[in-house]
Image (cartoon, rainbow, N blue to C red):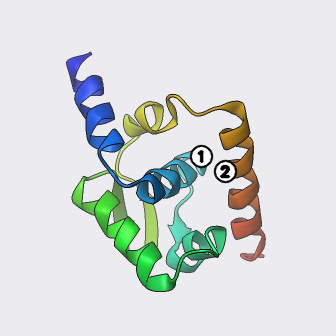
Amino acid sequence: SSMAQATRRDFDALPQTARAIGRLLSLAKDRALRFDECASAYPELTAQETHAQLQELLRAQFVRYEADLITIAHRGLHAALQQGMSATERATQHHKLASALTERF
């Protein structure tokens, strides 16, 4: 649909790191992540850089905040965010997600 194509264009226009974080959040399905969990998944970024990338996603309305938790803004976005992911990228992101969530327990 044209809506899906527009969503995809908006997503593709984001910085690469913002897209990666968006995909990570999408793979978490309906489970929201805390900021520190997003940050721990990308240790190469400073906290400020992670925050800036999340702000990009927020501005583009791909994510929303619920108290101190971050989640994909609505279910319809998952397909757009995960489209075109290679098996390698998906595996890498799942690994990052698992590592980030391990610290929760």
Using the image as rendered, state which of residue 71 and residue 93 is in the foreground: 93
**Picture quadrant where residue 70 is located:** bottom left
Measured as percent of width and height from the top left, residue 11 is found at 33, 42
Where residue 81 sits in the image (x, y, percent)?
A: 45, 39
Kind of residue at disc 2? Gln
Q: Toward which corner of the image does residue 89 lie, by quadrant? A: top right
The percent coordinates of residue 72 (x first, y second) are 42, 52
Asked whether residue 68 is in view, the answer is: no
> Which residue is labeled 2 in the image?
93
User: Between residues 55 and 89, which one lies in front from this camera angle?
Assistant: 89
Identify which residue is drawn at 36% across, 44% down.
74
Left or right relative to 14: residue 23: right
Q: Vertically, is 40 above or below 88?
A: below
Query: Where is residue 103 shown, x and y percent of the image?
Result: 75, 76
Secondary structure beneath dot 1 equals helix
* Mark 2 and mark 1 residues within 8 Å of each other at the beta carbon: yes
The label on residue 85 is none
Label disc, if present, on residue 27 of the rendered structure = 1
Direction from residue 77 to residue 42 in the image, left or right: right
Q: Looking at the picture, does residue 5 appear above or below residue 101?
A: above
Q: In this view, does 95 lie to the left or right of 20?
A: right
Disc 2/disc 1 C-alpha distance (Å): 8 Å
Residue 39 appears in the picture as rendered: yes
Location of residue 87 by image quarter: top right
- Taking the image as shown, residue 104 lies to the left or right of residue 39, namely right
Circle 2 or circle 1, nearest the eye:
2
The amino acid pointed to by label 1 is Leu
Question: What's the residue at 29%, 45% (across, down)?
Answer: 13
Point 24% across, 53% down: residue: 60
Quadrant (top left, top right, bottom left, bottom right) of the C terminus: bottom right
- Secondary structure category for the residue under label 2: helix
**Tag 2: Cα neighbours inside 10 Å, few (<14), some, or many (≥20)?**
many
